[in-house]
Amino acid sequence: MSKFDIHTVYKTQDGEKVPSVTTVLNVLAKPALIYWAWDLGIKGIDYRKYRDDKADIGTLVHKQILDHLRGQVTTPKEYTLEQLTTAEICFNKYMEWESKQQLEPVLLEAQLVSEKYKFGGTLDNYCKLDGVPTLVDYKTSKAIYEEYFYQLAGYKILLEEHGHSVKQCLILRIGRDETEGFEVCKRENLDIEEQIFLKCVEIYHLKGGI
């Protein structure tokens, strides 16, 4: 597996290109991200290199988890030893959590498009978790941010438009070392987040894309 992936292009049934869930959410201001980049700069760290390194780790962890759920073996390439070591820490945290659940995958890394709202997305895991239809999103980060739930709301809209019931949504925050820990955040209701996400879709299309 290469860490260099081509971004997915989403199209409606008539061939119209539409934005992804994450692209839609770029209409939102992200003051925390600005502070994060500033703080790294003060410490003499190039935020772009730092961001790309962490993104590579996140990509690898996602791949390891999804391959595991598919019964496949991950064969990573072009990663540093430090990235591989960090990813293994994350994967082991996930496996400890999963060992205590009954998880039956239904859709893994599914690419869906909304014909109604004109956007697409690739969700991590739609499954039955202890028998409950559940949308799961994996995050390798230090904290859970509100924007994560707007993203989940977008995926929930996609699933429901395609006939899948979603009774609960989970974010699994998988820390990259022992200090960052492991966190599960569950939401059974994303009504407000869905409204916010659809407003973002509307703004995106009104602006003619970004």
Image (spheres, rainbow, N blue to C red):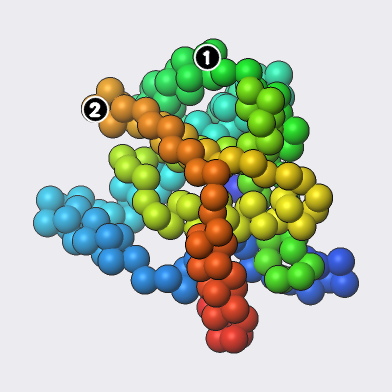
Around disc 2, counting alpha carbons within 10 Å, would you say few (fewer than 14), some (14 to 19), or many (20 or more)? few
Which quarter of the figure is the N terminus placed in?
Answer: top right
* Residue 195: % across, % down: 55, 67
Residue 167 vs residue 151: left or right? right
Residue that numbered label 2 is attached to: 179
Residue at 81% x, 50% y: name it.
163
Q: Amino acid at mark 1?
A: Lys
- Identify the secondary structure beneath mark 1: loop
Q: Give me the disc on residue 100.
A: 1
Residue at 53% x, 73% y: name it.
200
Q: Amino acid at mark 2?
A: Thr
Residue at 77% x, 46% y: name it.
164
Q: Quadrant of residue 41?
A: bottom left
The CA span between labels 1 and 2 is 22 Å
Q: Quadrant of residue 86?
A: top left
Q: Is residue 57 above or below residue 164?
A: above
**Sequence order check, earlier mark of 1 and 2:** 1
Q: Is residue 127 above or below residue 19?
A: above
* Residue 104: % across, % down: 70, 24
Camera-nearest residue between 63 and 205:
205
* Residue 120: % across, % down: 69, 61
* Residue 98: % across, % down: 54, 19
- Which of labels 1 and 2 is toward the front? 1
Around disc 1, counting alpha carbons within 10 Å, would you say few (fewer than 14), some (14 to 19), or many (20 or more)? few
